[in-house]
Image: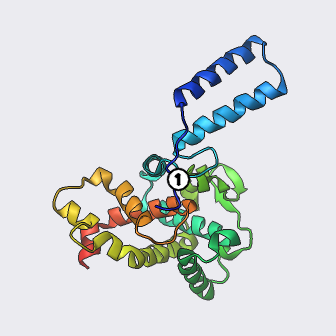
Amino acid sequence: MPFLSVNSIDNEPLLVKIIHELRSALKAGNLNTALAKTFSEKIEETITSFNLGLSPKGVVSHPETYIKNVVTQVERLNDGQLYAGLTLMCKDILIDPIKTKNNELAVMVDGVFKEQQAIFGGSPLFHEEPVYKMSDMSGITIKKGWYNGEIPSLLMDPAIVHEWTSMPGQKLFEKFKEKFKDVICKGDDSIYMKMEKGLLGQADLPVTIVSTILASGIAVSTFWIPIIVYFALLLIKAGLKTYCEA
């Protein structure tokens, strides 16, 4: 995975110790300057990033930790929520030209949305700045936090499930299935063959599928990982055997 750094944060226990000491000092009133507070916040941010599998600069330094974190957050969502979330995340990516430049997956996603727009041009999905209603709010836009692996509450809310979010999600899923089929199914060392031989458990499938796609040479960047996790979970629900033997 050439875009993923292999570096890690050194001396994590030391960082934890420092943050605890700073908290104690702040509570005691011994370090109440803005500088001390900023230092404390920065170390806390670093530790949070480390736990997500990220380096301080936001690079994925621990891919398996990062992927597992995303899987854990969304693995209990039903099909409708996964389809809707896939739609909204892909829509969010297309709004940012930096994330779509010279990217084969973005071209594929853009094709799906253009096709959908030609059929359902009046859909809320195609508003320039769509606002998605939530159960407990008047409405919010997608937070960019999911780019670093923290899935926002919006994408967990059943209120995002509509025909105009689910249908494009299903189309996107079909396109991803076509794109990644050889990577997942082809060859004696493929994920499918390992599963058939009993070398790969069901619990390991989501992380294995995502890791395999990332390592396959397909041009993807870190921010695609949550999207590929959604694809992997939908694929597992649909059945890997059916997918590979179709």
Look at mark 1 in the image and give the residue it sits on.
Answer: 5
Q: Is residue 209 left or right of residue 120?
A: left
* Residue name at image x 70 percent, y 59 percent: 141
- Name the image quarter holding the C terminus: bottom left
Which residue extends farthest right?
33
Which residue extends farthest bottom?
118
Q: Quadrant of residue 143?
A: bottom right
Q: Is residue 104 left or right of residue 233?
A: right
Q: Residues within 10 Å of mark 1 (few under 14, many from 20)?
A: some
* Amino acid found under the numbered disc labelled 1: Ser
Q: Position of residue 133 (x, y in %)?
A: 66, 59
**Is residue 124 in sight in this rendering?**
yes
Q: Is residue 45 left or right of residue 185?
A: right
**Vertical position of residue 84 compared to residue 71: above or below:** below
Q: Position of residue 241 (x, y in %)?
A: 24, 69
Residue in the foreground of this view, choosing between 164 and 5: 5
* Residue name at image x 48 percent, y 78 percent: 171
Q: Quadrant of residue 109?
A: bottom right
Q: Position of residue 178 (x, y in %)?
A: 39, 79
**Vertical position of residue 70 compared to residue 83: above or below:** above
**Is residue 96 in sight in this rendering?**
no
Q: Position of residue 12 (x, y in %)?
A: 54, 31
Q: How many marks?
A: 1
Under circle 1, the secondary element is: loop
Residue in the foreground of this view, choosing between 98 and 109: 98
Residue in the foreground of this view, choosing between 33 and 84: 33
